[in-house]
Image (cartoon, rainbow, N blue to C red):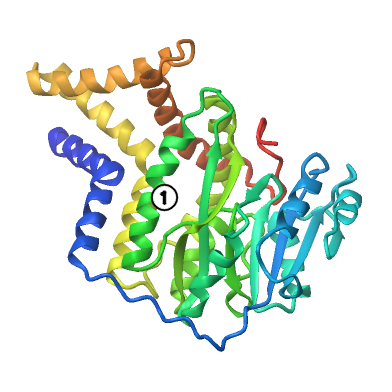
């Protein structure tokens, strides 16, 4: 029985971390690439309300407004709204001075409610969103709204590149793999997750969610349940500064997961209602099993250790040695800046952040408000 439990846990870990990508690639190669809808030469460029939710962003908000107003998009079709969530550091004044079309000064209620309020005041066909510390490439907005030519598309997320400031964080490696998975998911069905740096929805498709549930995870599957497609537009590019250290990334992901677990456990993600078979498999593989990975690791380690203690087996001794080597490398990565050790430390801490976020939510709930991650401004 211990052997069965070990191999199931180990097999699920290998599948969710690597096998899922192989499966998607195989399915994509076997499936004929869908033909993109031909652009309507008579269609007008859609109107867009570009919304930036900001809390205490005086340091970066002026540069953000300038960046948004410099986008290659017809100015008369673009409305820039900065929705200030109880900022007391001069963020509203600086946003106005930089040229934002509308600046909302709201009581502190969290990012989601600041976005909801901005959407409620918007009249545009498309509502797009970005964070205050993110810079978009000039053509990003055009690329972001292009997939909406297909009337089935309700949500689009773009590509964000993390700028490495020379610290120990290895988020860029993970994110490149994540973007590759997202491209395959989008090609085959719909994406299972987005990002807060660059995304958009049809105004009619916008979903009001619980204020502790971020859009990144809650929007894509909710769009699918409502009959929309949620797609990835890799040519819509943005960049943001990553947390400089692996430890800083752990803290950022821990906070993010305290917002994600409520979506998983009571926000409807686990309910297959409205999913097609392929999308249900994607949710199971990319979200449920990925978030369960710290517990699968603990099960694999505990059963492996029990097996080795019960009877000496070269195979299980090697498996245990590999697991302990990963942990030792992660520990050494705290003092030695060698890339393999830093990657091991990133993987272990990123995995641990999933469990830590669950613990935080279960222990004292998740506040709707947020603070900027250290070193990302």
Taking the image as shown, residue 28 lies to the left or right of residue 291, namely left
Count the marks: how many? 1
**Residue 298: image location, x then y, percent:** 33, 31
Residue of label 1: 179
Q: Residue lying farthest bottom?
A: 42
Q: Is residue 219 visible?
A: yes
Mark 1 residue element? helix
Residue 373 appears in which quarter of the rendering?
top right
- Could you classify mark 1 by the number of other residues whose Cα lies within 10 Å: few (under 14), some (14-19), or many (20 or more)? some
Q: Decide which of 63, 210 is in the foreground and name it.
A: 63
Taking the image as shown, residue 220 lies to the left or right of residue 306, namely right
Taking the image as shown, residue 182 lies to the left or right of residue 208, namely left
Q: Is residue 125 above or below residue 3?
A: below
Q: Is residue 43 above or below residue 287?
A: below
Q: What residue sits 36% from the left and 16% below the top?
A: 329
Q: What residue sits 74% from the left and 70% below the top?
A: 75
Q: Is residue 112 above or below residue 310?
A: below
**Residue 318: image location, x then y, percent:** 15, 20
Q: What residue sits 90% from the left and 53% below the top?
A: 97
Q: Is residue 268 visible?
A: no
Residue 325 appears in which quarter of the rendering?
top left
Instruction: Quarter of the image for the C terminus: give it.
Output: top right
Q: Decide which of 235, 210 is in the foreground and name it.
A: 235
Instruction: Quarter of the image for the N terminus: give it.
Output: top left
**Residue 133: image location, x then y, percent:** 69, 44
**Residue 102: image location, x then y, percent:** 84, 65
């Amino acid at each position: 029985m211990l052997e069965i439990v070990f191999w199931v846990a180990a097999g699920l870990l290998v599948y969710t971390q690597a096998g899922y990508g192989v499966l998607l690639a195989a399915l994509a190669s076997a499936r004929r690439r869908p033909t993109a809808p031909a652009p309507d030469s008579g269609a007008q460029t859609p109107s867009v309300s570009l919304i930036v939710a900001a809390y205490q962003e005086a340091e970066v908000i002026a540069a953000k407004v300038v960046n948004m107003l410099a986008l290659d998009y017809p100015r008369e079709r673009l409305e820039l709204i900065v929705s200030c969530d109880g900022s007391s550091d001069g963020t509203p004044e600086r946003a106005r001075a930089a040229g934002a079309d509308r600046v909302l000064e709201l009581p502190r209620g969290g990012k989601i409610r600041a976005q909801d309020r901005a959407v409620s005041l918007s009249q545009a066909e498309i509502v797009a969103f970005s964070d205050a510390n993110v810079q978009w490439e000039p053509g990003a907005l055009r690329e972001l709204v292009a997939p909406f030519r297909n009337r089935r598309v309700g949500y689009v997320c773009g590509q964000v590149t993390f700028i490495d400031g020379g610290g120990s964080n290895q988020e860029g490696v993970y994110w490149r793999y994540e973007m590759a998975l997202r491209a395959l998911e989008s090609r085959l069905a719909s994406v299972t997750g987005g990002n807060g740096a660059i995304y958009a929805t049809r105004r009619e498709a916008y979903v009001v969610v619980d204020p502790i549930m971020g859009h990144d995870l809650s929007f894509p599957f909710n769009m699918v349940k409502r009959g929309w497609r949620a797609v990835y537009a890799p040519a819509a590019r943005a960049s943001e500064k990553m947390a400089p250290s692996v430890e800083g990334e752990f803290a950022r992901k821990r906070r993010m997961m305290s917002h994600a677990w409520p979506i998983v456990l009571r926000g409807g993600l686990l309910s297959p209602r409205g999913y097609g078979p392929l999308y249900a498999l994607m949710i199971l593989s990319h979200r449920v099993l990925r978030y369960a990975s710290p517990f699968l690791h603990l099960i694999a380690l505990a059963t492996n250790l029990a097996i080795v203690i019960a009877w000496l087996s070269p195979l299980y001794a090697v498996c245990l040695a590999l697991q302990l080597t990963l942990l030792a490398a992660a520990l050494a990565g705290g003092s030695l800046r060698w890339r393999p050790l830093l990657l091991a430390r990133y993987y272990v801490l990123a995995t641990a952040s999933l469990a830590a976020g669950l613990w935080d939510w279960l222990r004292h709930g998740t506040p709707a408000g947020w603070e900027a991650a250290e070193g990302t401004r």
